[in-house]
Image (cartoon, rainbow, N blue to C red):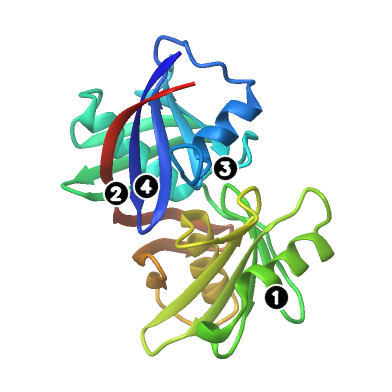
Amino acid sequence: MILTFYKYQGTGNDFVMIDNRTGFFPKKDVALVASLCDRRFGIGGDGLILLENDDESDFKMVYYNSDGNPSSLCGNGGRCLVAFAKHLGIIDDKASFNAVDGLHNATIEGDLVSLQMQDVTEIKEKDKYTFLDTGSPHHVQLVENLQELNVAKEGEKLRYGIYGKKGSNVNFVEPQETSFSVRTYERGVEDETLSCGTGVTAVAVAMHHSGQTQAENITLKTPGGNLKVQFNKSEKGYHNVYLTGPAKQVFKGEIEC
C-alpha cells in the first residue's frame, strides 16, 4: 500500500496525519501505526491521527500514541487536526469534531488554533502533586531547577510507580514571573515530548486551583514554544476551557507500507 500522509506540529508536538474519510486505513494494525511513527525507520511522530467522517460534526479524530495503541485525547493533536481539516477544505475558520472524550469546538486564524477542552470538575490534591483529567490523565508537580531535571527518568518513575500499567502523563512545573514553565513525560510515547496540550491545560487549571495564580488566562512555556490556556471558574469547576497556540503543516509525502 502506498500511503499519502501529512506531517503537522504544534509547539514541537508532531503528528502523522492521514485523511481516512474513505475508511481505507487498517485501524487495528498496531505494528503499522508504530512503524509509521518510528523516527528512524518510518515518518516519525509523537502520534498518528486519522481524520474521519462524522454524522454529528465536521469530522472525527482518531488518535494513536507512537507505540501504536489508541489513546485518550491529545490537545495539540486536536489543534493540528483542525489545521489539517482547513487544508483539506472541510472547514473555514470554525470547526466542531468528535474525539474519544466527546465533542470539541475550535477556531482557526492563520496558524493559530484555539481548541475548546472538556470541563474539569474533579481535581485531586496530594501533598506533593495534583492529579486531574483534561481529556487525558495528568500528574502535575512543582519542581525547582526545571531545566536541569531528567524528565525522562523522573517521569517514568512516577508514571509507573504511582499509576501502574495504565499510567498517567507527568508534568513538571516551575513558576515564572507571569507564566509557568512546563516539561512533560507522555505515556505511550514513554519519553519527554517538546509540548503536551492536555498537559499544559492540566497545569494551568492545577496552578489556579492550588492558588499559585489568580489569572484565568495563563501562558505556559514548553521546550517547543508557548501556549495559552484560558477558562472560567465556578463552584462546579472549570468551564469554557480553551487551549490556544500555533499548528503548522511541515510536509506532505508518500510511504510504502
Q: Camera-side residue: 178 or 169?
A: 169
Residue count near mark 3 (Cα–Cα under 10 Å), binned few <14, some 14–19, many ≥20 = many
Label 1 residue SS: loop
Question: Mark 3 sits on what residue?
Answer: 66
Point 52% across, 67% down: residue? 205
Q: Camera-side residue: 217 or 136?
A: 136
Examine the rendering and report whether any part of residue 212 can be seen: no
In-image side of 157 versus 251 (left or right):
right
Say whether disc 2 or disc 1 marks the residue closer to the N-terminus.
1
Please, what is the three-letter code of the amino acid marked with disc 1? Tyr
Residue count near mark 1 (Cα–Cα under 10 Å), binned few <14, some 14–19, many ≥20 = some
Q: Is residue 70 above or below residue 119?
A: above
Point 26% across, 42% down: residue? 249
Examine the rendering and report whether any part of residue 107 can be seen: yes
- How far apart marks 2 and 1 lie (CA) works out to 30 Å
Q: Are marks 4 and 2 in contact (CB under 8 Å)?
A: no
Q: Any mark on residue 247, and which?
A: 2
Question: Mark 4 sits on what residue?
Answer: 115
Image coordinates for residue 67, horizontal then vertical, percent: 63, 41
Using the rendered view, name the quadrant where residue 245 is placed. Answer: bottom left
Label 2 residue SS: loop
Question: Mark 1 sits on what residue?
Answer: 129
- How far apart marks 4 and 3 lie (CA) works out to 22 Å
Q: Furthest residue to the front?
A: 41
Mark nearest the camera among 4 and 3 is 3
Say how many tags the image has.
4
Image coordinates for residue 72, horizontal then vertical, percent: 60, 41
Please, what is the three-letter code of the amino acid marked with disc 4? Leu
Image coordinates for residue 144, horizontal then vertical, percent: 58, 90
Q: Is residue 144 above or below residue 102?
A: below
Image coordinates for residue 221, horizontal then vertical, percent: 39, 73
